[in-house]
Amino acid sequence: MSQERLKIEVAKAALKRVEDGMLLGVGTGSTVNAFIRELASSGIRLEGAVSSSEATTGLLREAGIRVVDLNHAGDLALYIDGADEVDPHRRLIKGGGGALTREKIIAGASRRFVCIVDESKCVKVLGEFPLPIEVIPMARAFVSRQMVKLGGRPELREDFMTDNGNLIIDVRQLDLIDPLKTETRINQIPGVVTCGLFAHRRADEVLIAGESGIRSLSSE
Ligand code: 5RP
């Protein structure tokens, strides 16, 4: 099965978690795009959606779904988003699409976070995928030096600005054997808005599409 097909299958599986009248948090990326397409044709009538990026906002509006500001929403029942890497403890690397900060805010504001991936995203230990870090522009060089001190190889994402007007540094070769500790450590560096480790607020459930169907990693 193609990766595109797997994304559609996992998007369909995620729809089973969505109920009429929900105010839903919606992530960013190609898997989420497949989810929005499935949602649009599902007949489910949401109260609205809180969006994690300008790109997602555009797609939600095209699908006729009302986009609600998080400040007017309170806590959300459910957040659906993809990931770049997933470990067996449902900890994630996110930010390949550069939307990590808004994604982390919505994940934090949601009672349940369901992550949707194809099986190519599953790893034993996080860190094969370069860790994205959103930084305030004036802190770019300083934060990069701190990443080198942590043993990483930072690279500025070329010609890219986040929806918040900041930069992304992608860091290779970091030791992520203890992602909780590393997330805390990186997020404390002045100038870091947030890093793409989702270990403190990990997924509650990961739906994984593979050749043999959909598998669920869950706390329940
Ligand atoms: C965007 C993200 C995405 O969830 C992540 O990059 C996965 O994207 P895709 O579904 O296209 O593989 O974190 O910031």
Image: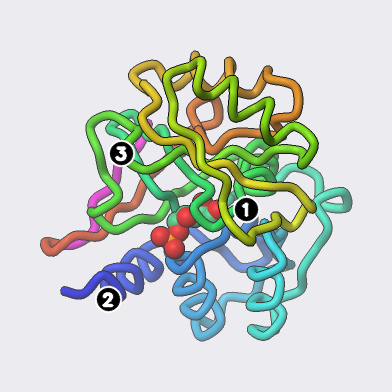
Q: Residues within 10 Å of mark 2 (few under 14, many from 20)?
A: some
Where's the C terminus, which quadrant?
Answer: top left
Between the residue at mark 3 and the residue at mark 2, the CA separation in whole angstroms equals: 24 Å
Q: Specify whether residue 39 is in view.
A: yes
**Residue under the image location 47 percent in, 70 percent down:** 35
Q: Which residues are magenta?
A: 213-220
* Image quarter of the N terminus: bottom left
Rendering coords of residue 193 (x, y %): 72, 34
Kindly identify the amino acid type of the residue bearing the numbered disc 1: Ala
**Residue 220 visible to the viewer:** no
Task: Bin the neighbour count of mark 1 within 10 Å (Cα to Cα): few under 14, some 14-19, many 20 and up.
Answer: many
Q: Nearer the viewer, residue 183 or 16?
A: 183
Residue hosting label 2: 5
Question: Disc 3 designates what residue?
Answer: 128
User: In the drawing, what numbered circle is on residue 99?
Assistant: 1
Locate residue 109 relative to residue 170 in the image: left or right. right
Tell me which secondary structure the magenta stretch mostly adopts.
strand
Tell me if label 3 and label 2 are in contact, CB under 8 Å.
no
Total of numbered circles in the picture?
A: 3
Q: Residue at x 64, y 55 (%)?
A: 25
